[in-house]
Amino acid sequence: MSGLLYNYYMRAVPPPLRKLLLPIISSPDTLRQLVAYGSISVTCFITDILLLKLFLVLQLPLSVAVSCAYLSAVTLQFFLNKYVTFRAFDRVLLAQGRTYFAVTGFNWLLALAFVEVGVRMFHVHPMTAKYASVPVIFVVGFIANRHLTFGAGITATVRRYLLLRP
């Protein structure tokens, strides 16, 4: 994304929100990655739904249909983020896959916690709680995948953090 387009988008964001977003959207490339990550997430969500419908039409058992659709969408998301969003060719595919699995598992636990807390403590419908978790999971997933999965990796990131700590 060009610097001109980046400046245009940043001027459109209200100043208090801009100050909050600057650490995340610190460069035009990061903004490009964020937009690509969001687009790929929506694409994979639609893929998940369409495959689930297809598998149900084919009369696969429900647990098999849900699992196959989800695993297909997650695999597609991994490869699209690896090659399109983050253009991450530095680390071995298997190492990135393990980290991606850990980040995806953490996000699943986060979504589960949102739904449980929403239902038990705030007495909201489970779908409302699930919808409330989406922005948090999106941001956590983007940052974790950018720095851990498709960045230096968990070990290198932790080492760097420990070295930079006062």
Image: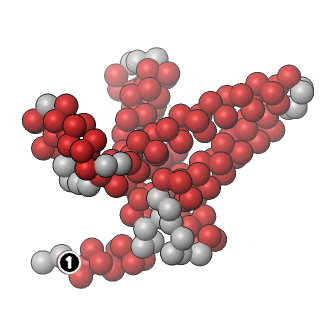
Judge from the rendering whether residue 157 lies leftward or rightward of residue 105; answer left or right.
left
In front of the other: 133 or 75: 75
Q: Would residue 144 be visible to someone looking at this image?
A: yes
Q: Report helix, strand or loop for mark 1.
A: helix
Looking at the image, which residue is at 14% across and 31% down? 14
Splitting the image into 4 quarters, where does residue 135 fall?
top left
- Local crowd size for mark 1, using a 10 Å CA cut-off: few (<14), some (14–19), many (≥20): few
In front of the other: 131 or 48: 48
**Where residue 116 sits: x, y (%)?**
45, 32
How is the rendered protein coloured?
secondary structure
Instruction: Give the number of marks.
Output: 1
In front of the other: 153 or 88: 88
**Where residue 129 sits: x, y (%)?**
43, 26
**Where residue 37 sits: x, y (%)?**
46, 45
Quarter holding the C terminus is: bottom left
Looking at the image, which residue is at 26% across and 55% down? 27
Question: Given the current orientation, which residue lies at the most extreme left position?
Answer: 15
Judge from the rendering whether residue 16 lies leftward or rightward of residue 102; answer left or right.
left
Looking at the image, which residue is at 20% across and 43% down? 7
Looking at the image, which residue is at 25% across and 50% down? 3
- Mark 1 = which residue? 164
The three-letter code of the residue at mark 1 reads Leu
Q: In the figure, 84 relative to 134: above or below?
A: below
Q: Would residue 140 be visible to someone looking at this image?
A: no
**Where residue 137 sits: x, y (%)?**
42, 42
Q: In the figure, 9 relative to 78: above or below?
A: above
